[in-house]
Amino acid sequence: MSLRSIYRLSVCATALSLATSLGGCSGPGAAEAYTGPGWYLEKSYTLVLGGPKVFGGPFTYDKCEEERLKLGPETSPDMLCVNHPGKPKKYGLY
């Protein structure tokens, strides 16, 4: 292997391990976090690898929006208040 190939391999391995560790540390999924009907504060599907992650709940809608806005202007647009009247089902690989 050339030095350039080894460099590319190490960069790819580092990027993959970083993505895996960030995806694993971002919170439980909706099915695991469900404790009762209500609104849950989640990070959406397109932003987190492996499906949405729950960061709080169950709340009333107003309390969920209040919690979302407490996260600050950088983070709050990425979060959603999602109503789960029943336990969410798992879809796909997550």
Image (cartoon, grey):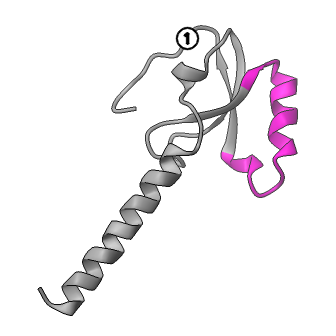
Q: How many marks?
A: 1
Task: Give the x, y percent position of residue 86.
Answer: 59, 8
| Image side of residue 77 versus residue 14, left or right | right
Please give the name of the residue rendered at 58% of the width and 35% of the height, measured from the top-left corner.
53
Task: Give the x, y percent position of residue 12.
Answer: 32, 70
Please give the name of the residue rendered at 67% of the width and 48% of the height, measured from the top-left corner.
78
Task: Give the x, y percent position of residue 3.
Answer: 21, 91
User: Could you say which is closer to the camera, residue 24 or residue 69?
Assistant: 24
The answer to which quarter of the image holds residue 93 is top left
Q: 10 Å neighbourhood of mark 1: few (<14), some, or many (≥20)?
A: some
- 63 w.r.t. 26: above or below: above
Which quadrant of the figure contains the N terminus?
bottom left
| Image side of residue 81 versus residue 70, left or right | left
The answer to which quarter of the image holds residue 38 is top right
Let me know if residue 65 is in the magenta part. yes
Residue highlighted by disc 1: 87
Task: Give the x, y percent position of residue 20.
Answer: 43, 52
| SS type, badge 1 | loop
- 26 w.r.t. 74: above or below: above
Farthest residue toward the left?
1
The answer to which quarter of the image holds residue 57 is top right
Q: Which residues are magenta?
A: 57-78
Which quadrant of the figure contains the C terminus?
top left
Residue type at the position of mark 1: Lys
